[in-house]
Image: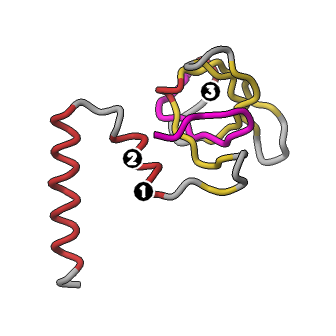
């Protein structure tokens, strides 16, 4: 599991209507309160701050690791989400991945 750190870019997994933040929006970690809580800044295209929101690490995935100056692979992004799911949905995703894998040989 990827551990969030200061200045990482993240993608929020849920809507935050009070702050007008929608699932899928990206922001940057600008402060760490404790092991699980981070202040995330969301900006518009002009770089103007839309919202500063304290979020649990369960509310987002890391998509860019500042420490290594590189994006997080799609596989690792998916793994971050899957790791938070209960066992049954994890099993369903595994079955779906197997299905997709078997279809790739037919395409």
Which secondary structure lies at badge 1? helix
Q: Position of residue 68 (x, y in %)?
A: 69, 52
Query: Is mark 1 in CB contact (under 8 Å) with mark 2?
Result: yes
- At 19% from the left and 34% from the top, the residue drawn is 87
> Can you tell which of label 1 and label 3 is closer to the viewer?
1
Residue in front for this viewpoint, 81 or 49: 81
Q: Position of residue 16 (x, y in %)?
A: 55, 24
Q: Which residue is mark 3?
A: 20
Quarter of the image containing the N terminus? top left
- At 84% from the left and 46% from the top, the residue drawn is 46
- At 20% from the left and 52% from the top, the residue drawn is 94
Residue in front for this viewpoint, 20 or 4: 4
Which secondary structure lies at badge 2? helix
Q: CA distance from mark 2 to mark 3?
A: 27 Å
Q: What residue span does the magenta drawing correspond to?
A: 1-17
Query: Is mark 1 in CB contact (under 8 Å) with mark 3?
Result: no
- At 55% from the left and 19% from the top, the residue drawn is 36
Q: CA distance from mark 1 to mark 3?
A: 29 Å
Which secondary structure lies at badge 3? loop
Q: Position of residue 30 (x, y in %)?
A: 76, 29
Q: Which residue is mark 2?
A: 79
Q: Which residue is mark 1?
A: 75
Residue 86 relative to residue 51: left or right:
left
Quarter of the image containing the C terminus? bottom left
């Amino acid at each position: 599991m990827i551990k969030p750190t200061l200045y990482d870019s993240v993608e929020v997994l849920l809507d935050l209507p009070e702050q007008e933040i929608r699932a899928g929006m990206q922001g940057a970690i600008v402060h760490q309160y404790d092991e699980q809580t981070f202040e995330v800044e969301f900006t518009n295209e002009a770089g103007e701050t839309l919202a500063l929101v304290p979020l649990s690490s369960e509310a987002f995935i890391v998509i860019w690791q500042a420490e290594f100056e590189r994006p997080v692979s799609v596989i690792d992004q998916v793994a971050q989400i899957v790791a938070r799911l209960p066992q049954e949905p994890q099993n369903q995703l595994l079955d779906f991945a197997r299905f997709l894998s078997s279809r790739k040989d037919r395409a």
